[in-house]
Image: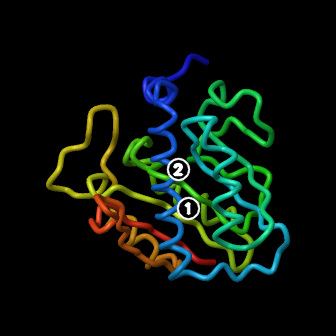
Amino acid sequence: MALSTFHQKQKNLTSEEIQSLISRREFELEQVFQQVEVKSPNTPLRIAVLGCGDIRIVDPYRKIFAGLLNRQVSINIFDITIEHLKGESNVYEFDATQPVPEGPYDIAYANELLKFIETERQWYAIENSYGALNDNGVAIHILDNQDFDESIPAAEGFYKVPLEMWKRNMYMQGIQFYEIPLFTGPKRKVEEALALVLVK
């Protein structure tokens, strides 16, 4: 399968841009784990990364999770196409609106995944990330504020995330969740993102 426009743009990022991306994701996850405890006793922790735009981020993900949680980790990477991840192990071609294979997991992590999915199908991705979890597992969905801000039109090629609707679904299904504002802007003092964290 040919690389999508998004994956092609990711491939063209410089090493400095990739490092900036990695640093931002580490800082976001650090904020999440300061507020949400990973209670699973499993060793290693099994982690599903749902969506990965660049092969240069795969190994840093392993280091970020292991470092922040001070635990051994085992990571499976999933994406709608995996041509751009060729050469990495534990990589699977996967549609996030389908049940997550190779589970169960202690953590399911998706960074800005929902905006790539048609709005009417996003709930399936949220529901499946939760369904893939062990008892005491957590599913983490990172959203840019513009992804769900109804006053801002969706960027070309992306879809809006009706956050309030998905929160109502979680209430109705009895899913415990947290909303954690994330600081990611200049000097890491600007609230630019949100972590939606589902706890099993």
Q: Is residue 55 above or below residue 173?
A: above
Q: Residue furthest right?
A: 43
- Residue picked out by circle 2: 22
Report if the CB atoms under discs 1 and 2 are less than 8 Å apart.
no
Where disc 2 sits, the SS reads helix
| Point 44% across, 50% down: residue | 112
In 3D space, how far apart are the residues under numbered discs 1 and 2 (Cα atoms)?
26 Å
Give the image location of residue 145, x and y in percent.
Answer: 29, 59
Picture coordinates of residue 19, whole percent (x, y): 51, 44
| Visible residue check, residue 165 | no
Q: Which residue lies at the image location 43% right of the left edge and 70% below the top edge?
A: 169
Q: In this view, does 154 lie to the left or right of 138?
A: left
**Residue sticking out furthest to the left:** 151
On screen, residue 5 above or below 48: above
Q: Residue visible at 58% across and 42% down? A: 52
Answer with mark 1 or mark 2, whichever residue precedes in sequence: 2
Can you give x and y, in whole percent of width and height, for residue 139 in the image? Answer: 58, 66
What residue sits 43% from the left and 23% below the top? 5
**Residue that carries the numbered disc 1 in the rendered image:** 127
Horizontal side of residue 199 vs 73, given as left or right:
left
The N terminus is located in which quarter?
top right
Color scheme of the displayed model? rainbow
Q: What element carries label 1?
A: helix
Answer yes or no: is residue 62 visible.
yes
Pick out the residue farthest to the top.
Answer: 2
Q: Where in the figure is residue 165, as x and y percent of width and height?
A: 34, 65
Label 1: how many Cα within 10 Å (few below 14, some 14–19, many 20+): many
Q: Residues within 10 Å of mark 2 (few under 14, many from 20)?
A: some
Q: What's under tag 2, amino acid-wise?
A: Ile
Q: Which of marks 1 and 2 is in front?
A: 2
